[in-house]
Image (spheres, rainbow, N blue to C red):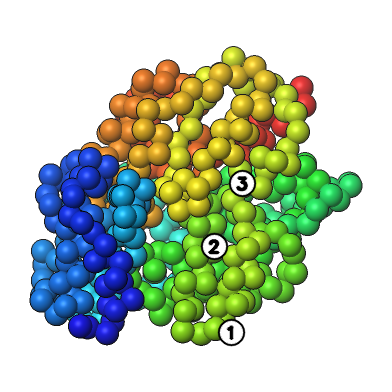
Amino acid sequence: MNEQYQHVYEEVSKCNRCGFCQAHCPIFAVTGSEKNVARGHNAHVRGLAEEKMEINADFKDALFECLLCKACVSNCFPAVRTDKAVVAGRAEYIKRVGQPKAMRLVFHTLLPDQEKLGKFVRLLALGKNTGLSKLARAMGILSWFGKDMDKAEGIVEKIPRTFFRQKVGTLRLEPAKVKTEVAYFVGCGFNYMLPHVSESTVEVLVGQGARVKIADNCCCGLPAYGYGDMEAARNMARKNIEALEKLKTEVIVTECGSCSAFLKEYPELFEDDQIMKKRAEAIAKKVKGFSEFMAPQIGALSANSLEGKKITYHDPCHMSRYQGVVKEPRDLIKKIPGVTYTEMPEADRCCGGAGSYNIMHYEQSMKVLEKKMENLKKTGADILTTECPGCVIQLSYGVRKAGLPIKVLHISELIKEASRKG
C-alpha cells in the first residue's frame, strides 16, 4: 500500500458503494458521471492507496471538479469523509505531476504576504475597473490562461480601489462601555473584494460592546489546502497562529465562513507536530463565525428601512456542513422586527462558487448556480443573505444574470442595517 494514503485508506474503505451520494451531489446532477460522485472519488483514492490506479487526465478532472461541499458526507450512512479523500488525491497529484507555476506563485508568494497580495489585486483592479479585462475577454485573450477564464471575467463587477485594512485607522474599534474583547480575523475576500462588509462587521461588533483587535493575519490557507498544497497551507497556518496568539483574546471572530471553518481545522494540519498541534487547538477553540458569535449576544433590533421586507438565507457549505452553524444566522434574522423570514428550498445546497471553482470550472458552476436561482425565485424574497464572500459574489452574479430584483447582503450588513436607530 502507498504509505502516503495509509491515513485515508481506512476512511475510503468504509464506502459501501450504495450510490446514495448521487442524489445529493451538485456536480453529479450536472454531469451524470459516476467519476464525479463520492463513491467514484473514494474508489479512485483507494486505487491509489493500493497502487492499482494511475494518475491520468480522467483522474485529475474528476478530483478537481469536486466542490468539496460535503453534501455527500452529510448524507452518507457510514459518514465517509470524501472531502478528505479528494484533498489527499489532489496532494498526490501535485506530488507526482507537479504544480503549475502560477498556482505556486499564488500559494507560496502572494497569499502568505499581505503587501504582495495587495499589489497583485491592485493590478487586477486596474484591468477590471478600466475595462481592459472586458477587452481581453472580447478578444478571447483570457482563455489563454484557462478554458473558462474569459467567461468568468464578468463574475466580479468591480474591484474596490481601497481595501479594508487601509480603512482601519478611520474606524471606531472600541465601544464606550467594553463588554468583551475579540480578535478580528480579516478574510482575503472581504479585505480586497468586499471591504464594506468588513466595515459592517466591525461596526456591529463595536455596537454590541466588543473591543475589536484587528489581527495581522494572512490568508487562512484554505485555497492552498483545497488544491492539495499542504506545505503552503501549513506555512500560512503557522503565521496566523502566531499572529492570533499575540492578541491574547478569548474569542476570534471572522465573518468569512470559509476562514472560520478552516481555522477550526488547523489542528488536523499538524498531526505530525504535537507542539504546533497544541497551539492550533488553543486557537481553534476560540474561533467563532459572525452569526455564531452574535446570535447569543445581540439584543432587540429596530426594523428601520428593512420593515416589510421578505428575507431568505443561503447556507454556505463551510458554515452548515463544516461547522454545523445553521440555527444562529436564522435566529439573527428573526430578531429583526417588521420583516418576514422565508426558508429557501435546498438552502444548504452549494451555490457553485466554492472559492475559485466558478473561475476554473465556469460552465459547471453556472449550472449549479441556476438551480440555486430557481429556488431563490420560489421564496419571493426581497433580500438574500449569507455568510461567505465567495457565496456573496456568486449569488450576486446569479441575481444579475437572472435579472432578479433581489438584494444580496452578507448577514453582518443586514444586522448593521437593522441596528440603526430611526
Identity, as a three-letter code, of the amino acid under mark 3: Glu
* Badge 2 or badge 1: first in the primary sequence: 2
Going by the image, does 159 lie left or right of 295? Answer: left
CA gap, disc 3 and disc 2 = 13 Å
CA gap, disc 1 and disc 3 = 28 Å
Within 10 angstroms of label 2, few (less than 14), some, or many (20 or more) residues? many
At mark 3, the secondary structure is helix
Where residue 325 appears, as percent x and y from the top left, is 53, 45
Within 10 angstroms of label 1, few (less than 14), some, or many (20 or more) residues? few
Within 10 angstroms of label 3, few (less than 14), some, or many (20 or more) residues? many
* Badge 3 or badge 2: first in the primary sequence: 2
Report the disc number at residue 292. Answer: 3
Identity, as a three-letter code, of the amino acid under mark 1: Ile
Find out whether the residues at labels 3 and 2 contact each other: C-beta distance under 8 Å: no
* Badge 1 or badge 3: first in the primary sequence: 1
Which residue in the protein does label 2 denote? 264
Where residue 307 appears, as percent x and y from the top left, is 63, 17
Report the disc number at residue 299. Answer: none
Which residue in the protein does label 1 denote? 275
Where residue 269 appears, as percent x and y from the top left, is 46, 74
Q: Nearer the viewer, residue 316 or 165?
A: 316
Where residue 68 appears, as percent x and y from the top left, is 33, 55
Going by the image, does 242 lie left or right of 179? Answer: left
Q: Residue at x 89, y 47 (%)?
A: 177
At mark 1, the secondary structure is helix
Quadrant assignment for the N terminus = bottom left
Q: Residue at x 34, y 27 (%)?
A: 375
Quarter of the image for residue 83 reads: bottom left
Quadrant assignment for the C terminus = top right
